[in-house]
Image: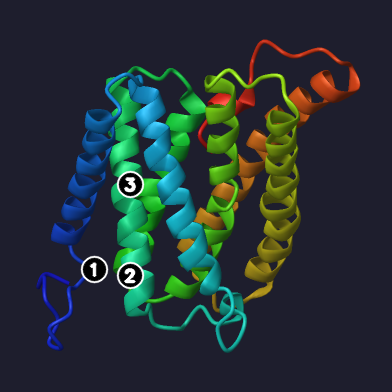
């Protein structure tokens, strides 16, 4: 775990150095976006990075759900090279984004808690050495909602609100969030609780993010009811939160 290069000359992603490098690269990416888009505010640039992270992690992570068997039935599987890469990439992003939120004084306590949790959970799973298939499958599934959320914010930021495009993207985000985080999340939580070989830390981390998903869902549901049922747009817009 201490060495930065494995014996087959591949980078060892299960190292503190890899985490630090990942965080620095995400920061450099953010700085590059700010350089090429000088007229955009810091949040706009930060959301571009969030959009990129969501696409990359969702694409690679969801692929880990379709291995030779359901990864949630095999907590003993050793973490693969690609799974370590995925976790260290996402861990670096969340460290960068957490620092950005603190620097720009984002007062959303739930989002700060979500980022702190993500850093701790990914750090634990990365250095655990196994159960990486479960962690990356869950990570990819949850991040699939993020690009839709960011696209919604960009559309609104560019003045295309209200519009059919905005409503379509917003509705897609809500539907995908419910299907993935609530329906599929509940299904996987049942499997996790029934699987006797899962260790307590993995169960605790899984249940914590599941509870957070329900908290976000309640906020989204209130927004949807007020906007689409009561025809009143609420003051607090859950789309401002980068879940």
**Marks 2 and 3: in contact by CB < 8 Å?**
no
Q: Nearer the viewer, residue 156 or 205?
A: 156
Which mark, by number, is residue 14?
Answer: 1
Q: Are marks 1 and 2 in contact (CB under 8 Å)?
A: yes
| On-image quarter of the N terminus | bottom left
Callout 2: SS = helix
- Look at mark 3 in the image and give the residue it sits on: 93
Counting residues from the N terminus, which is met first, the one under dot 1 or under dot 2?
1
Q: Residue tagged by mark 2?
A: 84
Q: Quadrant of the C terminus?
A: top right
**Relative to 69, residue 125 above or below:** above
Q: Is residue 130 visible?
A: yes
Residue beneath the point at 75% across and 45% down? 175
Splitting the image into 4 quarters, where does residue 122 fall? bottom left
Residue 71 on image: x %, y %: 56, 78
Describe the element under mark 1 as helix, strand or loop.
loop
Which residue is situated farthest in the right direction here? 229
Q: Quadrant of residue 124?
A: bottom left
Q: Which one is in front in this view, the residue at disc 3 or the one at disc 1?
A: 3
- Mark-to-mark CA distance, 1 and 2: 7 Å
Give the residue at x 28% y 50%: 92
Report x, y in % for residue 208. 55, 48
Q: Looking at the image, is mark 3 or mark 1 earlier in the sequence?
A: 1
The span from disc 3 to disc 1 (Cα, nearest Å) is: 16 Å
Left or right of 11, for residue 147: right
Q: Earlier in the sequence, mark 3 or mark 2?
A: 2
Cα separation between marks 3 and 2: 14 Å
């Amino acid at each position: 775990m201490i060495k930065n290069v494995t014996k087959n000359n591949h980078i060892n992603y299960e190292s503190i150095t890899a985490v630090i490098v990942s965080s620095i690269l995400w920061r450099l990416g953010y700085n590059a976006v700010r350089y090429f888009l000088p007229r955009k505010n810091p949040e706009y640039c930060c959301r571009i990075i969030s959009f990129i992270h969501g696409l990359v992690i969702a694409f690679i992570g969801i692929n880990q759900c379709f291995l030779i068997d359901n990864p949630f039935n095999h907590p003993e599987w050793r973490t693969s090279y690609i799974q370590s890469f995925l976790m260290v990439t996402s861990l670096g992003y969340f460290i960068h984004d957490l620092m950005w939120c603190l620097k720009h004084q984002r007062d959303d306590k739930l989002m700060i808690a979500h980022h702190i949790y993500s850093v701790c959970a990914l750090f634990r799973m990365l250095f655990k050495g196994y159960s990486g298939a479960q962690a990356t499958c869950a990570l990819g599934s949850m991040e699939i909602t993020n690009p839709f959320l960011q696209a919604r914010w960009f559309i609104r930021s560019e003045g295309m609100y209200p519009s059919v495009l905005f409503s379509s993207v917003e509705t897609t985000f809500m539907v995908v969030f419910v299907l993935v985080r609530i329906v599929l999340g509940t299904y996987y939580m049942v499997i996790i609780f029934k699987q006797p070989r899962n260790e307590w830390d993995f169960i605790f981390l899984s249940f914590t993010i599941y509870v957070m998903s329900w908290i976000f869902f309640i906020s989204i549901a209130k927004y949807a009811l007020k906007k689409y049922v009561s025809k009143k747009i609420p003051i607090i817009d859950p789309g401002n939160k980068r879940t």
